[in-house]
Amino acid sequence: MRPINGHQIGNVGSERGGVQLKYLGTAGWEITDRRTVVLIDPFLSRLRRVTPNDTVDPADNRPLFDNAAIAQSETATIDAHIQRADFVLMTHAHYDHAVDAPYIECKTGATTIGTESTYHFARAQGIPADKLIVVRGGEDYAFEGLSVRVIPSLHDVLRRAPNASLPPAIFSTRSRT
């Protein structure tokens, strides 16, 4: 194994070809068996995001990305790290997961699998509908050299889930003395 960005990454079953994992930062991964390349949430641009009360490093010369800015992919960084992709799996459409996906999709011709919001984001960026698969959770797909099982999940606390049934006592403020 060799360290990448402080993480030990290596081959699983490398003596037989196996699977290779590459950490891309944030939530991003590249998984390949040398025939099929799958990217998960490939965000490499690391946009300079500043929110109120943040300190700003004067040596950081990246363009500022705030609520009024339009996010732009850092294509040179992506080109240096992503040469090929067959599938892009998007867990959700927050900028720090999805903003680089359209550029990667155009560059590689990858098929993207993601939520309805991921679909709309990709379409707005010019990705053809036939290169997008919308999932809700619970689906199983079999592609040549790859199978994908979509597990439904929430990106928030469960008390806000539309179908959550929590015991009423959790929300009670009444004393039981």
Image (cartoon, grey):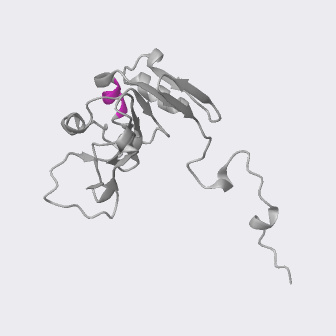
Q: Residue 122 in the image: state x and y as whole percent.
A: 42, 26
Viewed as shown, does residue 73 lie left or right of 38?
A: left
Residue that appears at 30% across and 63% down: 54
Which quadrant holds residue 2? bottom left
Q: Position of residue 146 (x, y in %)?
A: 49, 29
The quarter of the picture where the C terminus appears is bottom right
In the image: residue 120, left or right of residue 25: right
Residue 13 at least partly seen? yes
When asked about the image quadrant of residue 109, the answer is top left
What stretch of residues is rendered in magenta?
A: 101-105
Taking 155 as reference, is 56 left or right?
left
Residue ID at (74%, 45%): 163
Q: Is residue 123 rendered magenta in the image?
A: no
> Looking at the magenta stretch, what is its main secondary structure?
helix
Query: In the visual, does 148 lie left or right of 124?
Result: right
Q: Nearer the viewer, residue 134 or 145?
A: 145
Residue at left offset 55%, top offset 25%: 142
**For the N terminus, which image quadrant?**
bottom left
Reply above or below: 1 against 40. Answer: below
Give the total of numbered labels. 0
Depth check: give the residue in front, 31 or 90: 31
Q: Is residue 30 visible?
A: no
Query: Which residue sits furthest bottom?
Result: 177
Q: Position of residue 140 (x, y in %)?
A: 61, 30
17, above or below 165, in the image: above
**Rendering coords of residue 134 (x, y %):** 55, 26
Question: Which quadrant of the figure has residue 121?
Answer: top left
